Amino acid sequence: MTLAPETLDREVQLRLPDAWFTVCGLRALTPGRGVAVLLPDGRQAAVFRDRAGRLYGIDNRDPFGGAAVLSRGLTGTHKGRPFVASPLLKQRFDLETGRCLDDPSASVATYRMRTRAV
């Protein structure tokens, strides 16, 4: 898939409680793969772009294993829901809600995402 050049000259931003935080340029996000982002408070987020161009942001820490690895997980869909599967124990987390699809007692934080012209 080739995107028009004007769609790539944008920056990706993640919503924090008090402001939008610039993550990276849109060109840095490969559809179907995640990137880890260090937030100002020292936590990490995992940011994804799907093949349709939608952006998702979730906490990067796997609540089952405790490691910051969700950005390295495999993405897919289940019953129309986008998810990332943890590379540790393979639990799937809904990219829109943060809920674990395999264990309803677990979830990760989600972040609103947007792009902005540079």
Image (cartoon, grey):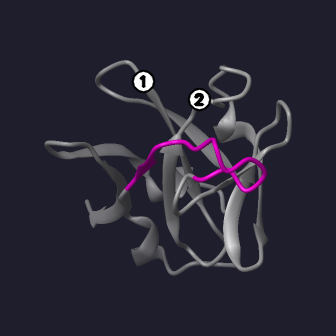
Where residue 12 appears, as percent x and y from the top left, is 38, 55
Say whether marks 1 and 2 touch (CB < 8 Å). yes
Distance from disc 1 to disc 2, alpha carbons, whole Å, reads 9 Å
Circle 2: residue type? Arg
Q: Is residue 82 above or below residue 110?
A: below
- Is the magenta region chiefly helix, strand or loop? loop
Mark carried by residue 87? none
| Residue at image mark 1 | 43
Please identify the quarter of the rendering in which residue 79 is found. Answer: bottom right
Q: In the displayed structure, does residue 118 sit left or right of residue 28?
A: left
Q: Is residue 85 above or below residue 80?
A: above
Q: In the displayed structure, does residue 6 sit left or right of residue 22?
A: right
Outermost residue toward the left in this view:
18
Q: Indicate whether residue 87 is drawn in magenta.
A: no
Where residue 68 appears, as percent x and y from the top left, is 62, 25
- Asked whether 106 or 69 is in front, the reply is 106
- Asked whether 22 or 112 is in front, the reply is 112
Circle 1: residue type? Arg
Specify the segment rendered in magenta.
99-111
Where residue 98 appears, as percent x and y from the top left, is 55, 52
Where residue 5 appears, as percent x and y from the top left, is 47, 75
| Residue at image mark 2 | 61
Q: Residue at x 67, y 38 (%)?
A: 70
Q: Residue at x 66, y 63 (%)?
A: 31
Instruction: Assign a secondary structure to mark 2.
Output: loop
Outermost residue toward the right in this view:
89
Answer few, some or many: residues within 10 Å of disc 1's Cα (few below 14, many 20 plus, some between 14 and 19).
few
Q: Quadrant of the C terminus?
A: bottom left
